Image (cartoon, rainbow, N blue to C red):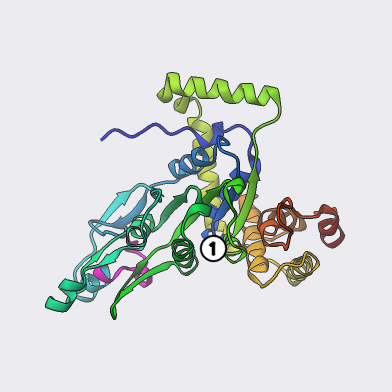
Amino acid sequence: MTTRPVFPFTAIVGQEAMKLALVLNIVSPSVGGVLIRGEKGTAKSTAARALAALLPEMTAVAGCRFSCDPDDPARLCPECRERLTAGQPLPRTRVPTRLVDLPVGATEDRVVGALDLETAIQDGKRRFEPGVLARANRGILYVDEVNLLDDHIVDALLDAAAMGVNTVEREGVSFTHPARFVLVGTMNPEEGELRPQLLDRFGLCVEVTGIAEPEDRVEVVKRLMAFEADPEAFMAAHAAEEKALGAKLAAARERVPRVTIDDAELAAIARLSIALGVDGHRADLVMMRAAKALAALSGRDAVIRDDLRRAAGLALPHRMRRKPFEAVGVDPEIVTSILGNAA
């Protein structure tokens, strides 16, 4: 099977906030995904697919429907756990990191999976047909126009993303499997908003618009023309940059568990959330995790104020109380008054 050419992540012109938000979720999936708001044609899907292509292959249990990690027994699916309990070895294979698209108009069963109740009743066995969440385990789940989905489906996606598991229950029969993925949602605000309760569940949020500089717009067109004319040559021309970024992300993922944040920085996070009128504590946790990911990406073992400032711009705007049609954003004067100007 031939691999479809993917536009290189490092060749995307502009859209730095979007690229950073995506990268931070790869460095630290606990950040909680990203919602990309804005007009069509701003490289949203291109960036998500390009990022998945950057990631290395991963070790998985051969034949497992959920791509379980054989070195992580705490997060095995029921089928792999039964094999392990029975003393059977878990055969290994190498698989690419998947990017899974949520089909437009997908039903709940298509998303979370379906249980065969007739088999369960007649034979006493649970027969589970995996859904999109199963395929996305340990990968990236891309949901275009997330604001047009039914709320109960969005709830299921966000619950699985937050808990790392997906549970399907029908008539007293249940099945639970691992569902750890980076959730990337996109939406055009002109087509309708998400409820605030759902907005808050996305770790980060970025606003994207078309590039305004003529020179940069010309560069976008030139790069697309070159890619379409000879995808292999275009990808080869950016191979060194792609390899360097992939190595940087891998190093940051290894470093992030060691990154520390002191009480003064945690207090600054709390003061900022209070000053901006942010409800709940999820914003504080996301800011902390994003700041740690930023530090790891910069090769540091401790969070500094500049990490907090950059994290605030991604973690807070969609959580602030605002009036209808009011622009999403964080008041830079409030941020400066609390975090200061120095790093």
Rendering coords of residue 305 (x, y %)? 77, 58
| Residue drawn at x 26%, y 59% as measured from the top left | 64
Q: Is residue 202 left or right of residue 213?
A: left
Q: Is residue 76 above or below residue 309?
A: below
Quadrant of the rendered structure where residue 339 is?
Answer: bottom right
How many numbered marks are there? 1
As for residue 76 lying within the magenta part, the answer is yes
For this rendering, which residue is in front, 229 or 172? 172
The percent coordinates of residue 280 (x first, y second) are 67, 73
Q: Is 40 located above or below residue 193 in the figure? A: above
For mark 1, does the 10 Å Cα neighbourhood hold few (<14), some (14 to 19), or many (20 or more) residues?
A: many
Whether residue 260 is visible: no
Q: Is residue 122 left or right of residue 264?
A: left
Q: Amino acid at mark 1?
A: Ser
Point out residue 270 in the picture as x, y percentages from the top left corner. Answer: 75, 70
Residue at position x 46%, y 49% from top? 142
Q: Which residues are magenta?
A: 68-79
Vertical side of 319 occupied by 45: above or below = above
Per the image, the residue denoted by label 1 is 30
Q: In the image, is 114 to the left or to the right of 213?
A: left
Camera-side residue: 6 or 86? 6
Left or right placement of residue 99 versus residue 280 in this view: left
Quadrant placement of the N terminus: top left
User: Is residue 52 covered in magenta?
Assistant: no
SS under mark 1: helix
Please report the residue visible at 55 percent of the width from the left and 61 percent of the height from the top. Answer: 32
Q: Furthest residue to the bottom?
A: 172
